Image (cartoon, rainbow, N blue to C red):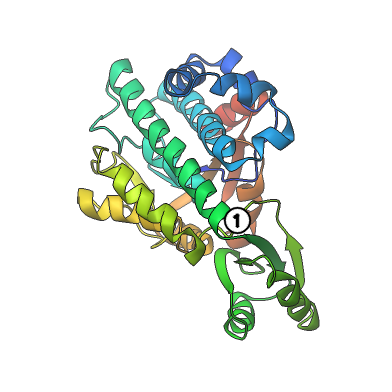
């Protein structure tokens, strides 16, 4: 086995009941939800019992998914630590980058050496993700937009189609055969027709805005302001950034700039996975709800071993596989 990476699920993977099973099975997971509730009361209750519709509202989705992602990561890390094993790098898809940074000790100057340090870092990351959700929700309300996943076409063709129409942008480079496009609400139907004419398929996504596009400029500015009140340090392990597909920098100003710019900049997921495999990662564990990233990684790096941790059963199976 080469190096192990944890990858953190992004928005869209949420479901009612996420994290509840893990919370009951892992002290580390339970501690994450307690930290979340300390900052935003009833977050765990919302994760465990809210309706699909309630969890789909951005201001709810982001803090709840953050908690579920981080809880899964901490639960598995706790299991692996018993045998002296730990991930050597992490990455998160869009929203998932915030719990990834938190897990890696990037916030509040914590190194994660003790329970108090870990709790402080988790709460700092959670406060930031709450602000991120609010800022992106406001930007989406100010600029009516949406997103479609384009499949059966290479990224270059999707870029060509976007270049030929105003108000649409390629924003998530997910795999060789899937690129997500964000755009203005009244423009996306015409763009989808062009995709069909090019023998591709455009599938609307259940999101409230044109995320990772110029529509999110206001959200980026709000995050820049919020980050002025966050202590950032070089993460303890490499966190591969969505924007650059390279590890986050040591310099605090550069790190904060990446976090703020991410919401209005395309997610380079394919390049991120390719860079990580080139850096020696051959085992990926998706932490958090669903298996979306697991599926994408299998398409990008079919030689890699891929696992996921979403519940107590997954936790046990994945820990056993990695500790063989």
> Measured from the top left, where is residue 248 in percent x and y?
31, 52
- Identified at 30% across, 36% down, the residue is 107
Q: Is residue 142 above or below residue 225?
A: below
- Identified at 59% across, 45% down, the residue is 11
Looking at the rendered structure, the secondary structure element under dot 1 is loop
> Measured from the top left, where is residue 36 in percent x and y?
46, 23
Q: Residue furthest front?
A: 142
Q: Looking at the image, can residue 317 be seen?
A: yes
Q: Looking at the image, can residue 283 be seen?
A: no
The residue wearing badge 1 is 209
- Identified at 49% across, 14% down, the residue is 27
> Measured from the top left, where is residue 234 in percent x and y?
24, 44
- Quadrant the C terminus occupies: top right
Query: In this orientation, which residue lies closer to the viewer: 10 or 64?
Result: 64
Q: Is residue 235 above or below residue 22?
A: below
| Residue 160: quarter of image | bottom right
> Measured from the top left, where is residue 90 in percent x and y?
43, 44
Residue 169 in the figure: left or right of residue 222: right
Q: Is residue 318 above or below residue 119?
A: below
């Amino acid at each position: 086995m080469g190096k192990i990476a944890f990858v953190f699920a992004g928005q869209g993977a949420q479901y009612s009941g996420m994290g509840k099973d893990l919370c009951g099975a892992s002290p580390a997971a339970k501690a994450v939800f307690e930290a979340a509730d300390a900052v935003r009361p009833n977050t765990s209750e919302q994760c465990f019992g809210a309706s699909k519709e309630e969890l789909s509202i951005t201001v709810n989705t982001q803090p709840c998914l953050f908690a579920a992602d981080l809880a899964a990561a901490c639960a598995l890390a706790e299991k692996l630590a018993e045998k002296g094993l730990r991930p050597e790098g992490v990455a998160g898809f869009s929203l998932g980058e915030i719990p990834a940074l938190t897990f890696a000790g990037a916030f509040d100057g914590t190194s994660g050496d003790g329970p108090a340090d870990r709790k402080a870092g988790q709460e700092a990351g959670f406060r930031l993700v709450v602000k991120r959700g609010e800022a992106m929700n406001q930007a989406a309300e100010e600029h009516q937009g949406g997103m479609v996943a384009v499949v059966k076409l290479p990224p270059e063709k999707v870029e060509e189609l976007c270049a030929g129409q105003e108000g649409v942008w390629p924003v998530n480079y997910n795999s060789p055969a899937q690129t997500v496009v964000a755009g203005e609400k009244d423009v996306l139907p015409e763009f989808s027709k062009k995709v069909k004419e090019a023998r591709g398929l455009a599938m609307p996504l259940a999101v409230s805005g044109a995320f990772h596009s110029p529509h999110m400029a206001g959200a980026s500015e709000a995050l820049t302001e919020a980050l002025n009140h966050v202590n950032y340090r070089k993460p303890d392990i490499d966190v591969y950034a969505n924007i650059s597909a390279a590890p986050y920098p040591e310099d605090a100003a550069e790190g904060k700039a990446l976090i703020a710019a991410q919401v209005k900049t395309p997610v380079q997921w394919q390049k991120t996975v390719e860079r990580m495999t080139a850096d020696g990662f051959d085992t990926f564990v998706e932490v958090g709800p669903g298996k979306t990233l697991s599926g994408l990684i299998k398409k990008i790096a079919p030689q890699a071993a891929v696992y996921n941790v979403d519940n107590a059963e997954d936790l046990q199976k994945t820990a056993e596989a990695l500790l063989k």
